[in-house]
Image (spheres, rainbow, N blue to C red):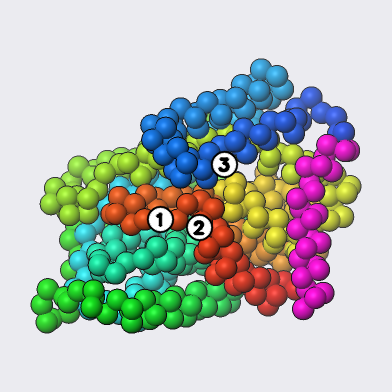
Amino acid sequence: MYSLLTKVLKYSILFFSFPFFIFADNLTSSHQPSIIFVFPFIILLCMIATGPLLYAHFWHKNYPKIALFLGSVVVFYYIFCLNNYLPPIEALAEYIQFIVFVGALYTISGSILVQVNLVTTPFANMILLLIGAFLSNFIGTTGASMLLIKPYIRLNQKRIQPYHILFFIFMVSNVGGALTPIGDAPLFLGFLKGVPFFWTLTHNFFPWLIALSLLALIFYFFDKSNTQKNISKIPSPNSKKKSLVIRGKQNFFFLLIVIFAIFLDPNIFPSIPSIHYYGHHFSFIREIIILLTAFFAYRLAHPSILKENQFNFEPIKEVSFIFIGIFFTMIPALELISIFAQSATGKNLINHHTLYWSTGSLSAFLDNAPTYLNCLAASMAAKGSTIQDVQAVKNYAQGYFLDSIIHLKAIAISSVFFGAMTYIGNAPNFMVKAIAEQSGIQMPSFFGYIFRYSIIILFPILFLVWLCFFYY
């Protein structure tokens, strides 16, 4: 066990030393950012962590301005100082794809009302979480989270505790979506780059099964303990007959349109009209279809459903502003890490261990979707290949390069699983937190979430996954 801990510590030190290696190497490039411009991201991260706790009124009133200002500092630096337009354009394109998809799933799912009439029990809660985790592979972690979070809260009403929401984030909003490219944003981006559709199901299934099973068991015992303490508060169902009622079923059709629309990508179908920039393609047709689908789903939704769901756009507004700041401010950090990975020193350090822990650590704090792409690009560069070539990515996923399958598996698993380590690791986390707080649930602070829950409950499972599937 001592050797295992030493190995984890060694790889962690190497990872957190990346920026200092870069600074020491004094690599020269007219387009290479200064390490100083990582600070806007650090400032934004610190304000996200401390704002709601220490200066809530100022933060809730000004977070859009703060996020836009810090993001603008980085964008202006790249355009006017580095004369490098590509990273901001790429970040903007990825942000638009991200927020259109997330916003559409939020809107459509919010127009569906799920009414569960059951006596709440630890077993019923566990089954609901497992259903949500499985469902997330078909409608995305965002879609499953938005569809089930309010029924889940209503089901537990008078005895709900923060851990109910946090296990929901762990299982439904993150780990559950590891089986298909539809499930989570990083896997979706990997699919668009050339990773075969069923690759994730083939290679991620057993880590997914173990992580999800352990989380379900831990939750069951947590909830069983809470049930025994609050047995008098458990509400009875409205009638003796147990029931599940779904209203707004037509919106499942709109969800299917969104899911099919995500495949309308020029990298998959070259004939699809797109915007070309610096050798890249932006599929505006897909985004237009998804936006129109969300618009009609909202306009055709019955007002009583929206009212009972307490539907409003405040959670997606918060995600929109926070994540545009994150997408722009993290450009220098991701680029510096990518540069280091392609250096002689970096290439020697890249293996499935460093990819698992570094991709995971970055996914927890830099958002897991762009982190997945940057770590995949770095790993392929170390093999003398490029992520810009769809066929090269396909070959990489199929094992044409030495250890490429285990490398991609480490990147895929850690980007999805570690996204649950913080509120900002994955977009649904933030939205679930916002909805829970609107429902009157006192959620942990940014650091409270990390130190009281994710490190204690989730991290040992992530360590076990590494031990079972990557430690050799």
Mark 3, other Cα within 10 Å: few <14 / some 14–19 / many ≥20: many
Q: Which residue is mark 3?
A: 45
**Regarding mark 2 in the picture, which secondary structure is present there?**
helix
Amino acid at dot 2: Tyr
Query: Of tags 1 and 3, which is closer to the observer?
Result: 1
The percent position of residue 34, horizontal first and vertical second, equals: 75, 30
The percent position of residue 341, horizontal first and vertical second, equals: 79, 47
**Regarding mark 3 in the picture, which secondary structure is present there?**
helix
Answer yes or no: is residue 455 visible: yes
| Span of residues in magenta | 1-25
Report how far apart the C-alphas of labels 2 and 3 lie in the structure.
14 Å
335 and 54: which is toward the camera:
54
Tell whether position 4 is magenta. yes
Amino acid at dot 3: Leu
Q: Which residue is mark 2?
A: 449
Q: Residue at x 56, y 29 (%)?
A: 70
293 and 395: which is toward the camera:
293
The reply to whether callout 2 and callout 1 are in contact (CB within 8 Å) is yes
The percent position of residue 48, horizontal first and vertical second, equals: 51, 42
Q: Earlier in the sequence, mark 1 or mark 3?
A: 3
Q: Residue at x 50, y 32 (%)?
A: 67
Tell whether position 407 is magenta. no
